[in-house]
Amino acid sequence: MTTGLVTIPARRGKAARVSAGQRVRVINTHGTQVVDAWAFSAEDPSEWMSMEASRAWFMKLAPAVGDTFLSNQRRPILTLVEDTSGCAHDTLMAPCDAPRYRLLGVTGHHDNCRDNLHAALAELQIAIPATPPSINLFMNIPWTPDGRLSWGEPVSAPGSYALFRAEMDLVIAFSACPQDILPINGRAGRILDAHFAIE
Amino acid sequence: MTTGLVTIPARRGKAARVSAGQRVRVINTHGTQVVDAWAFSAEDPSEWMSMEASRAWFMKLAPAVGDTFLSNQRRPILTLVEDTSGCAHDTLMAPCDAPRYRLLGVTGHHDNCRDNLHAALAELQIAIPATPPSINLFMNIPWTPDGRLSWGEPVSAPGSYALFRAEMDLVIAFSACPQDILPINGRAGRILDAHFAIE
């Protein structure tokens, strides 16, 4: 079954159920939009994709094609099976949240990935007790040999994608990151749609 | 007030309350023992030290003296104010847990940092809804320029320490990591005590 293209609306989140063995194609439609992503066991959403357990499994700062992400119970949850974006994905940085924008000088409301995650899950009647670290797809966070990090501009081509295989029945959640202060969505801070398909 | 030296028993955890402004000295007594560490707001233990928010704040893979760790509400929680261990601390790897040892081929029970954390908090009548990523003190995880990680042997001297200032009233928790299969506690896999003091 293919769902056809589902829109992750600019500045918003979207979640969907995926069966084990299905593939999730996440499309960098405009080439500049970071998509924060999470995955949860369909049986028990307190079992979620863990960046810290995944790094300890594939032994890299960022995944390569063939690498499998583990849940916080160390079970395979997603495998990156194809990638035309150059695997420019970040496992290090927290998804943005309301207090993050206050630290960046924003007064009043700012859309954010944490709220988007919980809202997207709520549409599926799912509640989780904390906000897990995300994988930040198409987000360019270079590191130096001495371990310094920086907020890079996007480097992937429009229409490039990352294709994941579901290793268990799961719920996948995305947020089209509304970060328009740092340059991670391009220096102009234009926040755009992205898309995914379940295949 | 100084507590004097508190033992983190080999293979076990220990938690303690710390007031804002107090300092916590964590001592690498034998030089080879990794100490996983967590911090929680005393007011609300669902606010915890976040490795992913902290990296996005100090913009490094590993902290240096002067760097402040943030909570998952992006509030300052601990600052590293002095360090004689060479700052060889890891923010990337998940604390070990029972399923981790099953992946490493262990059958039956193996002590682990996740269980140690929850047991140490339970001694203070504190329960938390998930296991946050830890900072793994004195744990040597080298990275290469292309982002590959490895399990290094310990590099800090016996008696070296990391000194943290509490930026809020908090609960600190430690586990003398029982990992005796990988070489992170030394190739011989000897698991030893470590110590801390609240000053």
Image (cartoon, coloured by chain):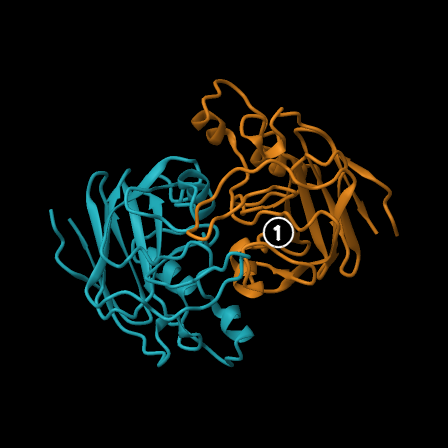
Chain colours: A cyan, B orange
Residue A115 is situated, as x and y percent measured from the top left of the image, at 41, 64
Q: Residue at x 54, y 55 (%)?
A: B61
Front residue of B86/B50: it is B86
Which x, y percent locates residue B4? 87, 42
Give coordinates of residue B183: x percent, y percent: 57, 31
Q: Is residue A169 visible?
A: yes
Q: Can residue B72 be seen here?
A: no
How many numbered discs?
1
**What amino acid is at disc 1?**
Pro
Between A100 and A151, the one nearer to me in the picture: A151
Which residue is more in the foreground, B144 or B56? Answer: B144
Please give left or right for residue A98 compared with residue A20 in the image: right
Q: Which residue is mark 1?
A: B45
At a point 41% along the width and 52% down the height, the residue shown is B146
Going by the picture, which residue comes out furthest to the top? B107
Report the side of A181 relative to A170 (left or right). right
